Image: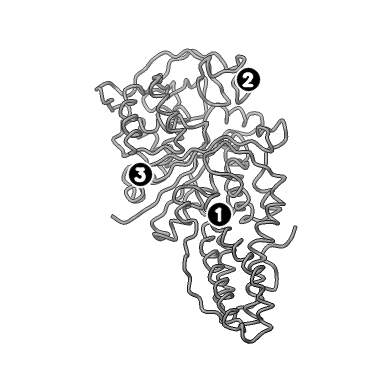
C-alpha cells in the first residue's frame, strides 16, 4: 500500500475570532503536511482544518450580535479562512459543521450508532434522564469537582442546573478496549503525561455521555433522526468531521486517507478525543486514528489569555508586523510542543533580529558576497545533508528541528569570523583554502535552505534560487529587513 499522511487540527469553535492558540495548532499541521508532501508527494497528503458551528453558545452569540446563527457562523468561519490565508496555511480542505454534506453524514452516523451494540452486547445508545450542572461556555456537563468556588474555572460562571431527557452513549462498555489500544501503542497519545492522564480517567471510570440535548435547551444543531424533541450534542457532531470531510463511508478520500495519522489538539478537548471518539469509531466498526498529539495551555507574557485582560493576540496582527513566514518561525521556535507554554510577545522583535536578521539573513549576505567577489560566483554544490531537523519534525519536536537548522547557521557565521576569508583572499597561495571554505559555507547554506522548506517555503525557495543561479550574486535586498 502506498504511503499516505493525514493530519487534522481540531475544528475551531466559532464563538470567537481566531487567536494565537488556534494559529499554533494550525501552523504545526501546516509544517507536517509540507514535510510529508516533500517526502511522499502532494497527492498522498491530506490536511484538514475547519470550524465547529453548532450549539447553545453559538445561538447565544448570534443573538447578541442581532443576526441568525447561520449568518453569525458564516461571518466567523470566514475570519478563520482569512487568518489561515494570511498565514499562508495550505490546508487541503476546510470543513464547516453547517455544510450540508457533513450534516447528512452525521445523521447516517447517528442511525448506525442507534443500531450498534457495545462489546458486551448492550445497545450503544439508550434513552435516559439527566440531571447535572451544565456550562454553556464549555458546552459540557460538569461535576462539583470540576468547579472552583462553585464556578467553571475557564469561564468564571456558575453552571446551570439542568434536568432533561436525553439519548446516552454507553461509554463505560468501550473503556477496557480503549485502554488496551492505548497501552499496546495502537493508539498513541503524546506526550506521555497526557497518556497517563487518559489511563487515569479510564481507571476511575467515566459516566455514560449524553449525545443529545433537548431542542428546548439547544435549538441550533442537527436533529436526532428518530426523536424530534432532541438535537445532536455538539461533540458528536464535531468529532465526526474527521471522517465526514473524507466522504465517509464510501468516498475515495476516506478509503485512501483514513485512519488519521495525527490528530492535533489542545488539552481542554483531550477527554472527548481520547475516549468518546474512539468509542464512537469502535461502535461503527471503523479503524481508530493512529495518534493524538496534545499541546498544553498557553499564557501570554505570564497571564492567561483573556478578552478582559486585552491580551488576546490575533495572528493577523503578527503577520502585519513580521509577515507570514516570520510569524510562524517566531511562534514555533519559542517553546517545545506538548508543554505548558508562555508566549512572550515582547521577545519576538529581539528574536527576529537575532535569529533572522543577524543569523540567517546575515549568513546569506556574507556567503553570496564572498562567492561573487572571490570565486566569480562559481561554486560546486555537493549537499551533505538536505534533511536537517527531519527526524525532529516526524516526532513533532518543531522547536528542536529549528534549533538543529540554526546550529548550522551559527556554525557558518562562526566559521567566517574565525577564518576571515577576506584576509585569505589577499594572498594567492591561500586560493585553494579559500575555495574550500566558501564551498563548505555554500553547501551548508543550501542544506539549511532545503531543510527550511516545511517552515518557511518562500524563504527556502529564495535562497535556493540564489545559490542555484549560473552565477551566485549577493541579493540586492536583505532577506530580513531590520525592524
Q: Quadrant of the C terminus?
A: bottom right
Residue at mark 2: 157
Residue under the point 53% across and 43% down: 337
Secondary structure state at the residue bearing disc 2: loop
Q: Earlier in the sequence, mark 2 or mark 1?
A: 2
Check disc 1 and report its element: helix, strand or loop.
Answer: helix
In this view of the protein, can residue 167 be seen by the observer? no
Between 235 and 325, the one lying in front of the other is: 325
Numbered label tally = 3
**Distance CA(mark 2)–CA(mark 1):** 41 Å
Do the CB atoms of the residues marked 1 and 3 lie less than 8 Å apart?
Answer: no
Circle 3: element type: loop
Point out residue 100 in the picture as x, y percentages from the top left corner.
Answer: 45, 41
Vertical arrangement, residue 140 with respect to residue 476, above or below: above
The residue at 64%/35% (across/down) is 299
Q: Name which residue lies at 58% across and 26% down.
A: 137
Picture quarter with the N terminus: bottom left
Task: Using the numbered discs, state the Cα–Cα distance from disc 1 to disc 3 in whole angstroms.
Answer: 29 Å
Comes first in the chain, label 1 or label 3 = 3
Quarter of the image where one finds residue 188: top left
Q: Depth-wise, is mark 1 or mark 3 nearer the camera?
A: 1
**Tag 3 and tag 2, C-beta contact below 8 Å:** no
Identify the residue position indicated by label 1 in the image. 402
Query: Of the residues tagged 2 and 1, which is closer to the observer?
Result: 1
Residue 455 location, x and y as percent? 55, 56
- Give the residue at mark 3: 259
Q: Position of residue 471 (x, y in %)?
A: 59, 81
Residue at the (40%, 29%) spot, across then down: 275
Give the camera-side residue of 199 and 430: 430
Amino acid at each position: 500500500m502506498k504511503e499516505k499522511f493525514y493530519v487534522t487540527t481540531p475544528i475551531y469553535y466559532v464563538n470567537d475570532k481566531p487567536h494565537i492558540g488556534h494559529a499554533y495548532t494550525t501552523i504545526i499541521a501546516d509544517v507536517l503536511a509540507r514535510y510529508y508532501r516533500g517526502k511522499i508527494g502532494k497527492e498522498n497528503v491530506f490536511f484538514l482544518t475547519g470550524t465547529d458551528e453548532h450549539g447553545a453558545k453559538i445561538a447565544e452569540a448570534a443573538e447578541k450580535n442581532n443576526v441568525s446563527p447561520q449568518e453569525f457562523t458564516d461571518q466567523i468561519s470566514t475570519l478563520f479562512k482569512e487568518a489561515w490565508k494570511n498565514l499562508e496555511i495550505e490546508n487541503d480542505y476546510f470543513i464547516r459543521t453547517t455544510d450540508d454534506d457533513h450534516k447528512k453524514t452525521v445523521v447516517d452516523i447517528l442511525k448506525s450508532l442507534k443500531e450498534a451494540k457495545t462489546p458486551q452486547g448492550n445497545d450503544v445508545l439508550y434513552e435516559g434522564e439527566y440531571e447535572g450542572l451544565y456550562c454553556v461556555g464549555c458546552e459540557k456537563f460538569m461535576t462539583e469537582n470540576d468547579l472552583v468556588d462553585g464556578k467553571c474555572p475557564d469561564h468564571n460562571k456558575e453552571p446551570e442546573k439542568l434536568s432533561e431527557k436525553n439519548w446516552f452513549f454507553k461509554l463505560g462498555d468501550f473503556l477496557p478496549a480503549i485502554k488496551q489500544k492505548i497501552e499496546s501503542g495502537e493508539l498513541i497519545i503524546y506526550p506521555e503525561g497526557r497518556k497517563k492522564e487518559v489511563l487515569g480517567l479510564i481507571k476511575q471510570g467515566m459516566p455514560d455521555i449524553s449525545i443529545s440535548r433537548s431542542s428546548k435547551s439547544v435549538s441550533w444543531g442537527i436533529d436526532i433522526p428518530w426523536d424530534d424533541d432532541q438535537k445532536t450534542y455538539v461533540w458528536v457532531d464535531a468529532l465526526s468531521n474527521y471522517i465526514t470531510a473524507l466522504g465517509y463511508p464510501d468516498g475515495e478520500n476516506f478509503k485512501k486517507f483514513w485512519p488519521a495519522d495525527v490528530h492535533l489538539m489542545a488539552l481542554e478537548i483531550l477527554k472527548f478525543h481520547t475516549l468518546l471518539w474512539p468509542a464512537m469509531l469502535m461502535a461503527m466498526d471503523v479503524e481508530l486514528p493512529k495518534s493524538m498529539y496534545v499541546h498544553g495551555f498557553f499564557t501570554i507574557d505570564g497571564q492567561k489569555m483573556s478578552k478582559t485582560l486585552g491580551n488576546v493576540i490575533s495572528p493577523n496582527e503578527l503577520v502585519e508586523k513580521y509577515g507570514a513566514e516570520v510569524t510562524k518561525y517566531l511562534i514555533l521556535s519559542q517553546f517545545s510542543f506538548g508543554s505548558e507554554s508562555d508566549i512572550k510577545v515582547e521577545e519576538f522583535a529581539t528574536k527576529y533580529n537575532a535569529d533572522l536578521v543577524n543569523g540567517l539573513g546575515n549568513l546569506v549576505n556574507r556567503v553570496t558576497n564572498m562567492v561573487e567577489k572571490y570565486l566569480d560566483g562559481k561554486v560546486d554544490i555537493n549537499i551533505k545533508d538536505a534533511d536537517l531537523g527531519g527526524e525532529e519534525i516526524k516526532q513533532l519536536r518543531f522547536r528542536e528541528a529549528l534549533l538543529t537548522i540554526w546550529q548550522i547557521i551559527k556554525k557558518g557565521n562562526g566559521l567566517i569570523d574565525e577564518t576571515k576569508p577576506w584576509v585569505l583572499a589577499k594572498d594567492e597561495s591561500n586560493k585553494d583554502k579559500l575555495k574550500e571554505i566558501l564551498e563548505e559555507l555554500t553547501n551548508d547554506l543550501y542544506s539549511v535552505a532545503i531543510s527550511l522548506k516545511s517552515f518557511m517555503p518562500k524563504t527556502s525557495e529564495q535562497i535556493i534560487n540564489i545559490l542555484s543561479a549560473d552565477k551566485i550574486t549577493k541579493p540586492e535586498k536583505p532577506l530580513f529587513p531590520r525592524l
